[in-house]
Image (cartoon, grey):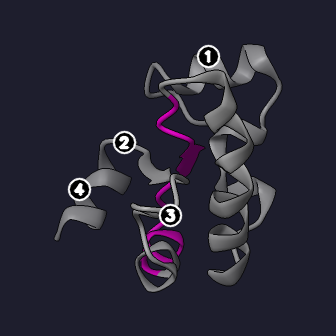
Amino acid sequence: MILKAAAQYKVAMELNSYPDRLDLCDSHLRLAKRHGVKIVINTDSHHTSHMEKIRYGVLQARRAWLTKDDVLNTLPAQKFAKAMKHAWP
């Protein structure tokens, strides 16, 4: 299973907040959490006006009962940068 491998190799999954996408859905996010896989919420922004769409990703994460401990980009900048090099805190 992909989520087991992601957890084993400390690979985060992306939650794309753009309304036309909203990848991953809430049930997939819950599965990721159960497997210990961290999530990164992004906006897939191609323009600064798209940054406001992060709220849709946050709402999706809340629907999946994720907490700040499940979402890597809630970390302070230095810890987030380290996590992006496959070293989750």
Indicate the amino acid at tag 1.
Ala
**Residue 6 left/right relative to 67:** left
Viewer-proximal residue among 77 and 9: 77
Indicate the amino acid at tag 4.
Ala
Contact flag, marks 1 and 4 (Cβ < 8 Å): no
Instruction: Give how far apart the Cα atoms at labels 1 and 4 are.
Output: 22 Å
Q: Is disc 2 placed on a helix, strand or loop?
A: loop
Tell me which label, 3 or 2, sits earlier in the chain: 2
Tell me which label, 1 or 4, sits earlier in the chain: 4
Q: Is disc 1 placed on a helix, strand or loop?
A: helix
What's drawn in magenta, residue-wise?
31-45
Viewer-proximal residue among 65 and 20: 20
Q: Which residue is mark 1?
A: 81
Q: Position of residue 42 (x, y in %)?
A: 56, 41
Contact flag, marks 2 and 4 (Cβ < 8 Å): yes
Q: Residue at x 52, y 31 (%)?
A: 45
Instruction: Give how far apart the Cα atoms at labels 3 and 2 are.
Output: 10 Å
Instruction: Give how far apart the Cα atoms at labels 2 and 1 are.
Output: 14 Å
Q: Which residue is mark 2?
A: 11
Tell me which label, 2 or 1, sits earlier in the chain: 2
Note whether 36 is above or below 29 in the view shown.
Answer: above
Q: Residue at x 57, y 36 (%)?
A: 88
Q: Please give the label number shown on residue 5.
A: 4
Instruction: Give how far apart the Cα atoms at labels 2 and 4 are.
Output: 8 Å
Please name which of the two marks, 1 or 3, marks the residue nearer to the observer: 1
